[in-house]
Image (cartoon, rainbow, N blue to C red):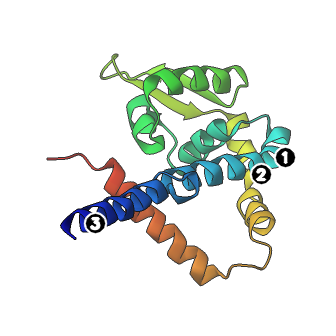
Amino acid sequence: MTDNKIVYNFIVWSDIMSEQLKLKNQICFKHYVISKEIIKKYRPYLEPLNLTYTGYITMLALWETDGMSVKALSNALYLDSGTLTPLLKKLENKNYINRQRDAQDERVVMVHLTKEGKALKKKAESIPSALAQDVFPSKIDEVSLNEHIKALDDVMKLLTSKSE
């Protein structure tokens, strides 16, 4: 009887482990697919502005706070300098931004919007609502969307907080 119980417990445990390893049960996979698909939906809105998604979020951060250091921008975007530096170079080549060494500390590189970069903001203003309409055409109300954004913010904070 005891041997049967051990075998039964092993089978139940195996079934549970099997379920946990199914792709459909992986929360990270769901987030990966959602991220990939939303970024794909941005493409038609960003192409006329000559921006990629990472270029767009960089411009969003700079429209919010012009004159950020590369380090502050990196922190705001959760991008490492190896990703951010080539991106900034591309935006600079498009004449959307310029980079300058800080006068007080030459180790610090400051990023500023150009006239063209500031003008791009007006062209981008309709993107968030157009994308929301494209992704959630009357299927989600504003309250639910705001609750979802708050829940995602909470997860981001949990995952990015420094362990002390």
The residue labelled by disc 1 is 44
Query: Which secondary structure lies at badge 2?
Result: helix
Q: Where is residue 96 drawn, in percent x and y?
A: 68, 31
Please tell me which of labels 3 and 2 falls first in the chain.
3
Residue 77 in the image: above or below residue 27: above
Q: Where is residue 47 drawn, in percent x and y?
A: 82, 39
Q: Looking at this rendering, what residue extends furthest in the front direction?
A: 1
Q: Which mark is residue 69?
A: none
Labels 1 and 2 touching (C-beta < 8 A) = yes
Query: Which secondary structure lies at badge 1?
Result: helix
The residue labelled by disc 2 is 41
Identified by mark 1, the residue type is: Pro
Q: Identify the residue at horizontal 28%, vertical 50% (top origin).
A: 161
Q: Looking at this rendering, what residue extends furthest in the top direction?
A: 106
Identified by mark 2, the residue type is: Lys
Q: Residue 4 carries which label?
A: 3
Residue 111 in the image: above or below residue 107: below
Left or right: 94 as drawn, with respect to 72: right
